[in-house]
Image: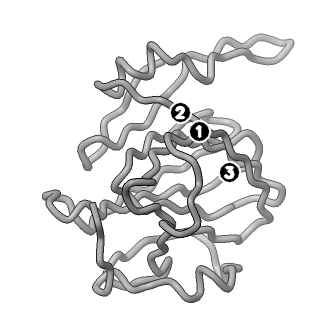
Amino acid sequence: MKAIKTKIKDLLILEPDVFGDDRGYFFESFNNDLFNTLAGKEVNFVQDNQSMSGANIVRGLHFQNPPFAQGKLVRVIKGEVVDVAVDIRMDSPTYGEHVSVRLSEENKLMFWIPPGFAHGFSSLKEGTIFSYKCTNYYNKESEGSLAWDDTDLGINWEVENPIISEKDKNSVAFNELKSQF
């Protein structure tokens, strides 16, 4: 597995070594020691989540405030997404910037998003299965959500007529964010 650095420090794209032949393929999707080496620090995952989405669904941009902030290692098991992380660390030189990564069952890429980022994705295919490894447990009282369509962020979700949850329709604008990071 190799780590690909992004324009924002600490966000990493992970590319596994995939071994394939006419029978199919095999790859190691997670190795704790290797991940910690690539991340440059010890990271402990405590919860795994999985979601299924139809095409043109946008989920996010979600985060949890300290002390329940979550890091996420995400990947697509089936289908394809545009995955987005927005830096909400107030003291960061890249505060308000984002990185978008296309994750799919074909490319098998993973995206490491440490605490201090809002996260979301758009599902590009029907029946997309998305997997998250999280560094903290979900805590409803600490959750927050940025407006997915905030023009200050300028995110290209690569979908027309996105389907959005009521919760995400009522998210705060970036310029109203009171980040605790």
Residue 155 is situated, as x and y percent measured from the top left of the image, at: 42, 72
Residue drawn 50% across the image and 27% down it = 15
Between discs 3 and 1, the one toward the N terminus: 3
Contact, mark 2 vs mark 1 (Cβ under 8 Å):
yes
Q: Nearer the viewer, residue 146 or 137?
A: 137
- Residue type at mark 3 is Glu
Q: Nearer the viewer, residue 159 or 113?
A: 113
Separation of residues labelled 2 and 1 (CA atoms): 6 Å
In the image, which is nearer the foreground, mark 3 or mark 2?
Answer: 2
Q: Residues within 10 Å of mark 3 (few under 14, many from 20)?
A: many
In the image, which is nearer the foreground, mark 2 or mark 1?
Answer: 2
In the displayed structure, does residue 159 sit left or right of residue 25? left
In the image, which is nearer the foreground, mark 3 or mark 1?
Answer: 1
Residue 123 is situated, as x and y percent measured from the top left of the image, at: 68, 61
Residue receiving disc 2: 45
Residue receiving disc 1: 133
Contact, mark 3 vs mark 2 (Cβ under 8 Å):
no
- Residue type at mark 1 is Lys
Between discs 3 and 2, the one toward the N terminus: 2
Number of labelled discs? 3
Tag 2, which secondary structure? loop
Tag 3, which secondary structure? strand
| Quadrant in the rendering for residue 180 | bottom left
- Disc assigned to residue 80: 3
- Residue type at mark 2 is Phe
Q: Residues within 10 Å of mark 2 (few under 14, many from 20)?
A: some
